[in-house]
Image (tube, grey):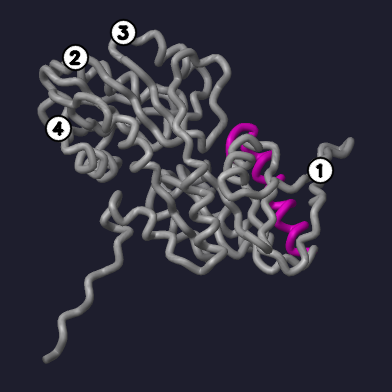
Amino acid sequence: MKGIVVFSGSAHPGLADEICSRMGIERSGVHISRFSNDCLQAQLLTNCRQRDVYIVQPLVPPTQDHLMELLLMVNAARGASASSITAVIPHYAYARSDKKDSSRISIGGRLVADLLATAGVDRVVTMALHAPQVHGFFSVPVDHLTALGVIADHYRDRHLTDHVVVSPDLGNAKQATLLARLLNLPVAAGNKQRLADDKVVIESIVGDVAGKHAIVLDDEIATGGSIVEIVTRLVDFGAIDASVACTHGLFAGSAVERLTSSDYISEVVSTNTVPAPPDFPGLITLSVAGLFAEAIERIHSGRSVSKLFNDVDPSYAPPPEPPGLF
């Protein structure tokens, strides 16, 4: 891994350390300071000249501070003559702001993508974008990773008779279908209507869940409102209980209390794209550091990143060769 330098902001240094450990290198130091007028400043403490720089920083609360840290670290690396700069953003929070669904509303997903490019990012590595179209917001290459294989491995050793994979809404049904395929299980989905950021209504369930143990899959759990609602409706439709799995476990506000107080949630599983809350008893955390380390190594050596997921998601597989003319 000669020529690689990995930095991290204050958002999730633990994940950055684990990624570096998998790569056999040390994380380089960063000094983040705050002036009396509340402005941030970032100083990279390792030489970057003509080296490939990777900056690990998920956008987690306080999201605006961590975004600004990332932009400043990118700017510092560009000014230090880095050969290339890759922003490793395991959780791209602004992916939820992906469309104009109300009058005079901002589209933060596109704006933040533009800010990263303006700051000097050459490439972005992220995981499980909330909406696939956000990939197209970036003017630089994006490697979009998936944690479905890691989540599937968590369930493979179990006796999965009478289980069903469930998506809380039809928008996430493709990911639920992929997990169901990996586990050789049927799939179901809720018909969700969002009334507010922390309030949803699920009117019906598409698919048979009666008498089954549900594996509820979502890309992100923030307040836990959608999860509690879908589990309640699953029980109403005859499900026995639910194991809840997600890629980004933010667990904001009263999410921990909501999830732990449900009599029908048997476990909550999340990856470590974001820091785990210290007050969540029984939370199962799966590591995706190996995926990010392998992606960085492949980028550095000019190898395919998508081949990591050929057996997980068919959309990553290369297209078939066109038939010959003769």
Using the image, tell me which numbered label, if any, was put on residue 110: none
- CA–CA distance between discs 1 and 3? 45 Å
Which residue is under mark 4?
206
Using the image, tell me which numbered label, if any, was put on residue 263: 3
- Residue name at image x 11 percent, y 20 percent: 210
Dot 4 falls on a residue whose secondary structure is strand
Furthest toward the right, the residue is 36
Name the amino acid, label 3: Asp
Dot 1 falls on a residue whose secondary structure is strand
Magenta segment boundaries in residue numbering? 59-79
First in sequence: mark 1 or mark 4?
1
Name the amino acid, label 4: Val
First in sequence: mark 1 or mark 3?
1
Dot 3 falls on a residue whose secondary structure is loop
Using the image, tell me which numbered label, if any, was put on residue 240: 2
- CA–CA distance between discs 2 and 4? 17 Å
Mark 2 and mark 4 in contact? Answer it, CB < 8 Å.
no
Seen in the picture, residue 50 relative to 157 is either above or below; the reply is below
Which residue is under mark 1?
31
- CA–CA distance between discs 4 and 3? 23 Å
First in sequence: mark 2 or mark 3?
2
Mark 1 and mark 2 in contact? Answer it, CB < 8 Å.
no
From the image, give the main secondary structure of the stretch colored magenta: helix
- Residue name at image x 82 percent, y 50 percent: 45
Name the amino acid, label 1: His
